[in-house]
């Protein structure tokens, strides 16, 4: 029955309509939509898309990841553009450094014949800090003190339009009107989730303005938005959900008089990206995911997007508050760049089966076949056959929407058993089942070889000197020096405590607040001092006279801290002045929520806050600030900068009491490949460490945090049948949410040059337990 299928590769069977962009590449084309499908120059197409984010992939891996994603059977990639990553200062854009060359990334997609959905937002969520917005767009500066985000507000609308215009100008050579792969653009994102936070009239007016603005910036572009049905017909509303079939038939087409095609920008698979440190990892069974896709396509979808096809890594400091550095633990393609045995082959089989039947699916035009109730208990059939050519391709969908009952049905002269919460795809001529969402016999696992690499030639450490306001000089001497982070510091000392990001200008997770307090006779007699203050950051370290007192870790948005500080060993007298130093460390801003402009992090920066030192409110003391760590400013993580630092063997530290705030340097030679026909893939196992920053040969691999998920005993069974949500199927209870931290093989040195794994650790730790986990494929895909 598969005769006539175009053989695109040894393992991919698709129809000629698989890559519709190839018919138009480098020739201007227009994009339109009807009820059933999108059209390129009036040619109907079915878009199967997968999300992949350029900023979460090392540039040397861009092409290989695009090619592997394409191998699943998609013909389009969906990607966000991240405002804060490109407009690094107001009016200053960066389109080239680090992973920012989005033009190059899209050119690579173009070379593979893939369409591109460009999701501008510019609010995107995507578990990116502040939803992708620049942190200077908040009410903590004089210029933006009256800004309101994502509503009718002149300041916000001006900035939103300016960035949207900048993106369109930068990428317009790659738009459809110029023969490029960008055939669709998105303005705003999931606005229906937060519209309730604004007066109804304002929400409607804002989204109408957003639509009008987008079309004024690019009048020939096909614009969509997401999760906001009350939009004018110029802008196509799309859906984000686990299941979109009923939305399409019962909501979307009804709302828009059967004129807008059904587009899904996110159908979430695996653990879609919003996993937080300290939680068990979510897993969506592939049988449920493929059921939802088959149902949606059968019901009449024009475009479906898998979120995420490949998640990648939250390098640097980009990720939203408390989210893991791995962006998705369980997508079809794993973070290290190989197929996921949980999903890959079963999903690829589905997408390529749909690709084969595209001519049948589109042959009916907007005259969609009815949903026929085969049973009274949830089984429906949908038959696509050309009304004018009985010899043409046809396809039948049988969908069992009952989440408990397996059902056997008769269709014409054949009987079919449809498992609960599953779907069959049946060839219309042979009546053979060509895909069964509940049957995983096609999900052949890939064989892997793994090893633990522990052959570090040296493990050394150096204390972080910022707590002493000192830096190293001539390897073993010190001099006082101001950090270059302070070149544009808004404040040097104040009589009110400052909000973290307004002070650091988003240059570091770390901000040190220092003040001095004169002790009373009562303080000296008591020997214990109570310190109470609000904490709106993830880590707080408290020092008296530069001696560490205590540390606190917290992932809530805000807690009230009350701690007892011991001054017994400080040899203080009445009226002595004591230095209080507070080091606050954030994990950036929330990526999702309402009234973003009010989001603040740090310690006591709200008008009514107090900092109580043994009953005395010292918030009006003079406070001095140090942005970041000396090691960040001086780039201890850069092999070119750290050679002359006084590194000490780790044995020196381990023989004494371990202390907070240390930099570690682990040197090693690049190991040979495990498997002769497969490249090594690398992850650092951070066993023995707690929380900090991670670098490979000067390249930031992001934050690490090794806290455990809670225990759950017994772990409930995971049943794919029935509506899914992230609380339903979780794994790795009682284990660290993330212990493995990926880095690209392209970061490693060749020709016998040492590699340097540099770590900044906030607490006492045991770096001798760290190892590099190496994985290689023994079977090809």
Image (cartoon, rainbow, N blue to C red):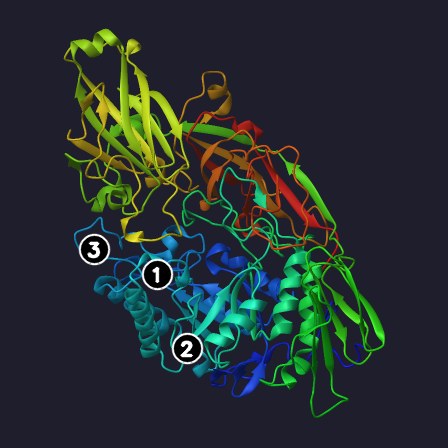
Dot 3 falls on a residue whose secondary structure is loop
- Asked where in the image residue 411 lies, by quadrant, the reply is bottom right
Which disc number belongs to residue 94? 1
Mark 2 or 3, nearer chain start: 3
Identify the residue position indicated by label 2 in the image.
Answer: 173
Please provide percent x and percent y for residue 19: 61, 77
Please say if the residues under marks 1 and 2 sit with CB atoms less than 8 Å apart. no
Task: Count neighbours of disc 2 (C-alpha within 10 A) and say few if under 14, some if 14 to 19, many if 20 or more.
Answer: some
- Asked where in the image residue 292 lies, by quadrant, the reply is bottom right
Please provide percent x and percent y for residue 514: 23, 29
Separation of marks 2 and 3 at Cα, in angstroms: 33 Å
Q: Residue at x 60, y 36 (%)?
A: 733
Residue 474 in view (yes/no): no
Task: Count neighbours of disc 3 (C-alpha within 10 A) and say few if under 14, some if 14 to 19, many if 20 or more.
Answer: some
Task: Identify which residue, 457 or 604, lies in the foreground.
Answer: 604
Is 753 on the left-hand or right-hand side of 422?
left
* Residue found at the far right of this picture: 413
Q: Residue at x 19, y 10 (%)?
A: 522
Please say if the residues under marks 3 and 1 sit with CB atoms less than 8 Å apart. no
Identify the residue position indicated by label 3 in the image.
Answer: 144
Please provide percent x and percent y for residue 598: 27, 49
* Residue found at the far front of this picture: 376
Dot 2 falls on a residue whose secondary structure is helix
- Quadrant (top left/top right/bottom left/bottom right) for the N terminus: bottom right
């Amino acid at each position: 029955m598969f005769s006539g299928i175009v053989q695109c590769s040894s393992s991919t069977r698709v129809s000629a309509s698989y890559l519709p962009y190839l018919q138009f590449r480098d020739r201007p084309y227009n994009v339109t939509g009807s009820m059933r499908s999108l059209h390129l120059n009036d040619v109907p197409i079915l878009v199967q898309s997968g999300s992949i984010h350029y900023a979460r992939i090392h540039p040397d891996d861009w092409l290989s990841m695009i090619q592997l994603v394409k191998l699943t059977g998609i013909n389009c990639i969906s990607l966000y553009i991240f405002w804060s990553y490109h407009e690094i200062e107001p009016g200053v854009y960066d389109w080239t450094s680090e992973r920012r060359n989005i033009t190059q990334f899209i050119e690579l997609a173009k070379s593979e014949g893939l369409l591109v959905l460009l999701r501008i937002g510019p609010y995107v969520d995507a578990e990116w800090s502040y939803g992708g917005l620049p942190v200077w767009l908040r009410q903590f500066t004089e210029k933006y003190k009256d800004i309101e985000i994502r509503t009718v507000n002149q300041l916000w609308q001006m900035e939103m339009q300016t960035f949207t215009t900048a993106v369109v100008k930068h990428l317009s050579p790659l738009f459809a009107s110029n023969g490029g792969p960008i055939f669709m653009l998105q303005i705003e994102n999931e606005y229906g989730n937060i519209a309730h936070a604004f007066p109804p009239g304002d929400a409607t007016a804002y989204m109408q303005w957003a639509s009008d603005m987008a079309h004024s910036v690019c009048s020939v572009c096909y614009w969509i938005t997401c999760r906001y049905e009350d939009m004018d017909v110029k802008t196509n509303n799309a859906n984000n959900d686990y299941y979109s079939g009923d939305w399409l038939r019962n909501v979307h087409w009804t709302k828009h008089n059967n004129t807008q095609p059904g587009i899904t920008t996110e159908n979430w698979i695996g653990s879609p990206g919003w996993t937080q440190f300290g939680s068990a990892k979510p897993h969506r069974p592939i049988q449920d995911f493929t059921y939802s896709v088959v149902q949606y396509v059968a019901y009449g979808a024009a475009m479906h997007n898998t979120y995420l096809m490949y998640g990648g890594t939250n390098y640097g400091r980009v990720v939203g508050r408390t989210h893991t550095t791995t962006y998705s633990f369980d997508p079809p393609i794993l973070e290290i760049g190989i197929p996921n045995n949980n999903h890959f082959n079963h999903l690829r089989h589905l997408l390529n089966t749909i690709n084969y039947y595209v001519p049948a699916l589109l042959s009916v035009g907007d005259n969609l076949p009815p949903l026929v109730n085969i049973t009274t208990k949830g089984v429906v059939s949908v038959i696509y056959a050309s009304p004018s050519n009985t010899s043409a391709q046809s396809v039948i969908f049988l969908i069992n929407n009952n989440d408990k009952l397996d059902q056997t049905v008769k269709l014409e002269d054949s009987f079919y058993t449809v498992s609960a919460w599953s779907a069959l795809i049946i060839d219309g001529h042979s009546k053979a089942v060509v895909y069964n969402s509940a049957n995983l016999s096609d999900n052949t696992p890939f064989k892997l070889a793994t090893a633990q690499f522990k052959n570090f030639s040296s493990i050394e450490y150096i204390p972080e000197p910022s707590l002493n306001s000192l830096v190293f000089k001539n390897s073993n001497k010190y001099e006082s020096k101001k950090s270059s982070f302070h070149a544009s510091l808004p404040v040097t000392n104040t009589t009110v405590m400052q909000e973290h990001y307004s002070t650091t200008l988003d240059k570091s997770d770390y901000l040190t607040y220092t003040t001095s307090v004169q002790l009373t006779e009562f303080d000296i007699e008591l020997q214990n001092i109570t310190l109470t203050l609000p904490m709106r950051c993830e880590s707080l370290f408290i020092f008296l006279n530069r001696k560490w007192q205590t540390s606190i870790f917290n992932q809530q948005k805000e807690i009230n801290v009350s701690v007892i500080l011991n001054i017994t060993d400080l040899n203080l007298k009445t009226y002595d002045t004591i230095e209080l130093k507070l080091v606050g460390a954030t994990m950036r801003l929330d990526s999702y929520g309402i009234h973003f402009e009010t989001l603040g992090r740090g310690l006591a920066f709200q008008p009514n806050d107090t900092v109580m030192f043994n009953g005395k409110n010292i918030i009006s003391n003079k406070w001095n600030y140090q942005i970041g760590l000396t090691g960040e400013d001086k780039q201890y993580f850069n092999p070119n900068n750290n050679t002359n630092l006084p590194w000490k063997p780790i044995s020196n530290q381990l023989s004494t009491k371990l202390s907070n705030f240390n930099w570690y340097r682990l040197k090693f030679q690049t190991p040979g490949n495990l498997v002769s026909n497969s490249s090594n893939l690398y992850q650092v196992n951070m066993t023995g460490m707690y929380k900090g920053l991670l670098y490979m040969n000067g390249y930031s691999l992001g934050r690490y945090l090794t806290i455990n998920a809670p225990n759950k005993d017994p772990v409930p069974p995971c049943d794919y049948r029935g509506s899914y949500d992230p609380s339903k199927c979780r794994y790795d209870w009682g284990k660290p949410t993330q212990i493995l931290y990926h880095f690209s093989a392209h970061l490693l040195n060749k020709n016998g040059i040492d590699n340097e794994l540099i770590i900044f650790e906030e607490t006492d730790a045991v770096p001798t337990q760290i190892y590099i986990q190496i994985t290689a494929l023994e079977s090809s895909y």
